[in-house]
Image (spheres, grey):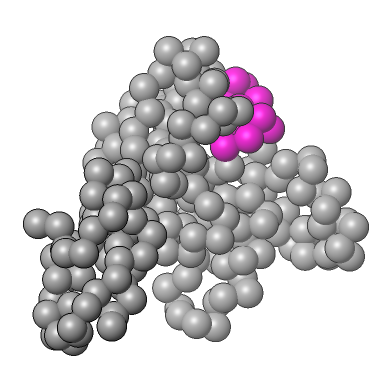
Amino acid sequence: WLLCEGTTLGSSGDSHGMRSEAQVEEELVRLAAEAASGKLLAVAASGQNVDRLVSCYRAAKRTGRQLVIDPYQAFVLMKLAGLSPNIPQFTWRQVRVSFAPNQVRRLEAAGLMELAHEMAVHARVSSDQLAAEPGRYLFCMRGGHGTTKLLDKVGPARVAPVWSMWRGYWEREGNALREWCELNSLDVSFVHSGGHAWPGDLRRLTDAIGAAETVWVHTDAETSQLAD
């Protein structure tokens, strides 16, 4: 028996987005180029999705923008710096840090104000700077109410929103960014790769193992065969 992950099988497969992180980067490059006329490319992504943060950095660099992250994202990247020289750091010239008041309070509570000061010295970008020249930046952001207040300051007409997480999260009730986009009649671009194995890859795996029976886990329908 083979127990096999099957998230992309069935009707929900397309909700997991693109098939590789390289495709995500290329689409972000395209959107950043299209939004070059004074628009902030605002990408909602998980602060722990390091692949996505790297893709955002690479897309920003390729289109002459600076990557804007928050202190938490900067902290995560700093902790992982030893894994690869290609993981962007807040000390890099093309990386800026936007400080949300609640995150500053959390840094203080954690005894990390010295690190917060170092981030500010090297990389702080203010909301006034983002609003003055939004076309200079690719903002890898959270999707909460604090972020929408910052986007209000930039101005909805000068924001190109991108949802870079599972599409199911976008549809959930109480999504502040979705409500903000709807309120301001803004279309959002969906640019995501979930990291789940796709049917073609699963077929190669199951064919190679040749188990007598395969049980598919985490699907949206009962199935005993790999979908075409």
The answer to whether residue 214 is above or below residue 93 is: below
Q: Position of residue 152 (x, y in %)?
A: 60, 20
Which residue is at 90% across, 57% downward? Answer: 109
150 in the magenta segment: yes
Q: Nearer the viewer, residue 187 or 223?
A: 223
Is residue 37 left or right of 111 when viewed as pictured?
A: left
Q: Position of residue 98 (x, y in %)?
A: 65, 45
Q: In which quarter of the view is residue 148 placed?
A: top right
**Residue 104 shows in the view:** yes
Q: Main secondary structure of the magenta part?
A: helix
The image quadrant where one finds the C terminus is bottom left
Number of on-image labels: 0
Q: Position of residue 218 (x, y in %)?
A: 38, 60
Is residue 32 left or right of 164 when viewed as pictured?
A: left
User: Which portion, as a residue range, is magenta?
Assistant: 143-153
Is residue 184 left or right of 218 when viewed as pictured?
A: right
The answer to whether residue 139 is above or below residue 228 is: above
The answer to whether residue 202 is above or below residue 218 is: below
Q: Nearer the viewer, residue 228 or 113?
A: 228
